[in-house]
Amino acid sequence: MRNKPNRRDFIKLAGLLPIGLVGPRILQKLGRRASVQSDKQNVLVIVFDAWSANHISTYGYERETTPNLSRLAENAVVYHSHYASGNFTTPGTASLLTGTLPWTHRAFNANGTVVEPFTTQNIFGAFQNHYRIAYTHNPWANTLLEQFKNVIDESVPWFSLFLRSFNDDLIHETFKNDDDIASVSWARNVNVSDDGYSYSLFFSHLYQVLVERSVAAYRKLFPRGIPSIASAHNSFVLDEAVDWTAKRLTEISQPFLGYFHYLPPHDPYRTSIDFFDRFKNDGFEPLDKPEDAFTKKIPKANLSKLRTEYDEYLLYVDEQYGRLFEQLNASGVLENTWVVLTSDHGEMFERGIDGHTTDTLYEPVIHVPLMIFEPGKSERVDIHTPTSAIDLLPTLLHVTGQGVPDWVEGKILEPYAGNNPDPNRGVYSMRSNKNGKYSPLTRASISLTKGRYKLHYYFGYEDKNIPEILKLFDLEADPEELVDLSTSQVSITAELLKEIKAKLTDANESYLHE
Ligand SMILES: [Zn+2]
């Protein structure tokens, strides 16, 4: 099914701006030639930011948001109850990368950082015999990658896959102490000779023209605006990031560990022209849910509109993942590469709350996709046991024949663990973005999912006039979290709360005297 056959061609045409060239050229010295026939096991982790499993049709969402994923899932291990360890980028990403919970790595504040041992005790440090390459569009995820740079062989600059990376202001801002050198290397790394320009032209003028021309062309392809970071003018095109990734992975040495963390479907939700208005007036009625104590008072009509725009953006993400997979398959990279597809947290449009800037931990903000594509595997396996982002690191080490270090808090995932799942295993998610990094947790939201039950425990929100909250849901009978059982299932509530409090006591111990 090809929607608008000209869009790819148009993007190529629009690409007068040599986006994507800065990264590889700056880093060319690091690249060694690939041997695609290698029997070495590569690992590629693909993260799409703020991608809620509750909006993915492969997992049962009513709107068909992921036709490509559904097709590809036929050859994957599909995890149905997978949880991010936090509800926004920093804790979600740090847990995924360190295999530890937020109260252990301590990156739980906005744009926060991990505590010292985890600058090397992380997925990059653990895969020390692999060629480690990492990229993210997301500045907060990039803060973490910066922290880990001593154990990453190729840190692709975050701005290198942005259209405005060619903007003078950004270059100057990025290299505050190094203006001249930055400008020179920036200019040297642009290849415009095919278009009849030469290096003798006045660069800043030329770039300005190219930027404007290119952005104008892209604008037609993205009716809601070119995808960008919410708070900045920097825009980017996911197609380009995908193409760059697929190409770069054929050039680097093997075995490699790749971590690519793209911003879509993070807001602002700006789908491509192919999917624009696809779900408009489709008759879909989201379930009506009561306003939460943490409501942001977003009217239902606005939530519904945002949901539709988000769902349309998911179609674009799904298309691009399909393209990436196709390119990796065509180049032979998939022959010996484990591919992991996941997200750092979800997104929500219910109970008066939009997005993921919320102190709540309802399913849509923490329930994320996880699929593992094993090289050469052509059957689908479905796993319904609750699993956690912290399980990825030990699992990937295990499947590539490496030991799991003792600082890892996650477990090797089914079906690779070789034993039956532990029925008593609890999966935690937490948010505590207004708590000191080195202080005991006194203001936090924590959820514990165990078997079919999930307990929400919120405390320390007196400043919002919200007393301590406990809510228990039976996710099997009530996946939409509508019927609070905390007062009817008293013993289950007490048991789960006891477990959370014991964890908290442990987690707080090292910080009591700070
Ligand atoms: Zn995020």
Image (tube, rainbow, N blue to C red):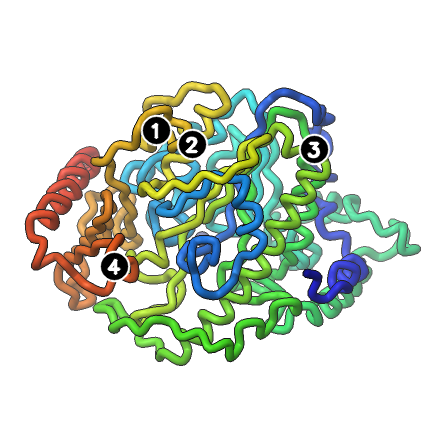
Judged from the image, the secondary structure of the residue bearing numbered disc 1 is loop
**Which residue is label 2 attached to?**
393
* First in residue order: circle 2 vs circle 3: 3
Residue type for callout 4: Asp
Q: At 41% across and 50% down in the image, what residue appears? A: 368
Residue type for callout 1: Val
Residue 486 falls in image quadrant = bottom left
Q: CA distance from mark 2 to mark 4?
A: 31 Å
Q: At 14% across and 58% down in the image, what residue appears? A: 485
Q: Which mark is residue 478?
A: 4
* First in residue order: circle 2 vs circle 4: 2
* Residue 123, percent from left and from top: 46, 31
Q: CA distance from mark 2 to mark 3?
A: 24 Å
Residue type for callout 2: Leu
In the image, is 341 to the left or to the right of 251?
left
Residue type for callout 3: Gly
**Disc 4 beta carbon < 8 A from ligand 1?**
no
* Residue 506, percent from left and from top: 17, 35
Is the C-beta separation of discs 3 and 1 under 8 Å?
no
**Which residue is label 1 attached to?**
408
Is the C-beta separation of discs 1 and 2 under 8 Å?
yes
Q: Which mark is residue 332?
A: 3
Judged from the image, the secondary structure of the residue bearing numbered disc 4 is loop
